[in-house]
Amino acid sequence: MTAPRPMPDSAPVVLIHGLWYGRISLKPMAARLERKGWAVDRFAYATVRRSIDSSAASLSEFLRRYRPDEPVHLVGHSLGGLVALHMIEHFDVPAARLVLLGSPVNGSTVAHRLGRLGPLKRLVGRAAGPLEAAGRRAPEGWEVGVVAGTQGLGVGRLIAPLPRPHDGTVAEVETRLDGEADRLLLPVSHTGLVLSPAVAAAVDRFLEHGRFGAS
């Protein structure tokens, strides 16, 4: 494994929320990262009504507020991580670091089940396709860290059986990304991934060092 490359200390951070969560869900993590000295912004998008192509394009436009040559670190929760990966794949942005928090890069069993439950399809809307897709890999030039929760609390486990460990909505195996730089399992639920101080501390370490284990 190659050593992580240095990043500018001043590199900004953009947080991207997951399905149904909204910008407000990222406020605790944003506050914790800001106390660590990061300049943090939060990207909002319509998770159900808009396609991933549209959301990725909006994220790319959102990043235009920074200098064209300035690396911007990204932190995506669940569907937000898939939006980030899609944006990186289809738009020209400087390589930086990306942290995925419970993002089902190998497809979501719960979303797949919801998409086949008649009226409940509307709960996932246009996010169904991205949430069911699989086979994603880390984008070239980016260092990607993955955090998966192992506290199996959440309504997702009532919708579809999930292999353990899982966070109540997404199974750990669904978060495994080919080419990831580092991986960390923590005893938190899917919602806890954006609320936990331990997760925020891990994100801080990865953004600074490119590894979760750095001190």
Image (tube, helix red, strand yellow):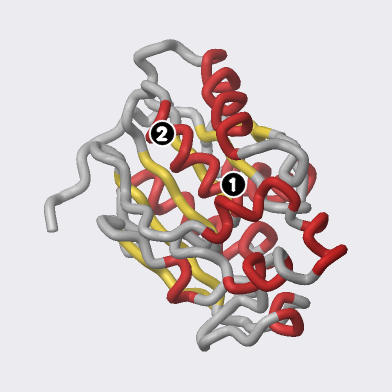
User: Whole-Å distance between the Cαs marked 2 and 1?
Assistant: 12 Å
Q: Name the residue under label 2.
A: 88
Foreground: 137 or 100? Answer: 137
Specify the quadrant of the image occupied by residue 124: bottom right
In the displayed structure, would residue 109 be above or below residue 81?
A: below
Q: Which mark is residue 69?
A: none
Query: SS at mark 1?
Result: helix
Q: Which mark is residue 80?
A: 1
Q: Can residue 112 be seen in this view?
A: yes
Give the residue type that dot 1 points to.
Gly
Q: Residue furthest right?
A: 119
User: In the shown orientation, is residue 152 left or right of residue 182?
Assistant: right
Location of residue 113 in the rendering, given as x and y in whole percent from the top left corner:
68, 73
Specify the quadrant of the image occupied by residue 33: top right
Residue at 72%, 69% in the rendered image: 116
Residue at 52%, 23% in the rendered image: 60
Instruction: Locate the C terminus by quadrant.
Output: bottom left
User: In the shown orientation, is residue 67 left or right of residue 77?
Assistant: left
In the displayed structure, would residue 151 be above or below residue 77?
A: below
Location of residue 199 in the rendering, given as x and y in whole percent from the top left corner:
55, 62
User: In the shown orientation, is residue 157 left or right of residue 123?
Assistant: left
Query: SS at mark 2?
Result: helix
| Mark 2 neighbour density, 10 Å: few (under 14) some (14–19) many (20 or more) | many
Residue at 56%, 80% in the rendered image: 166
| Mark 1 neighbour density, 10 Å: few (under 14) some (14–19) many (20 or more) | many
Give the residue type that dot 2 points to.
Ile
Location of residue 183 in the rendering, given as x and y in whole percent from the top left corner:
36, 66
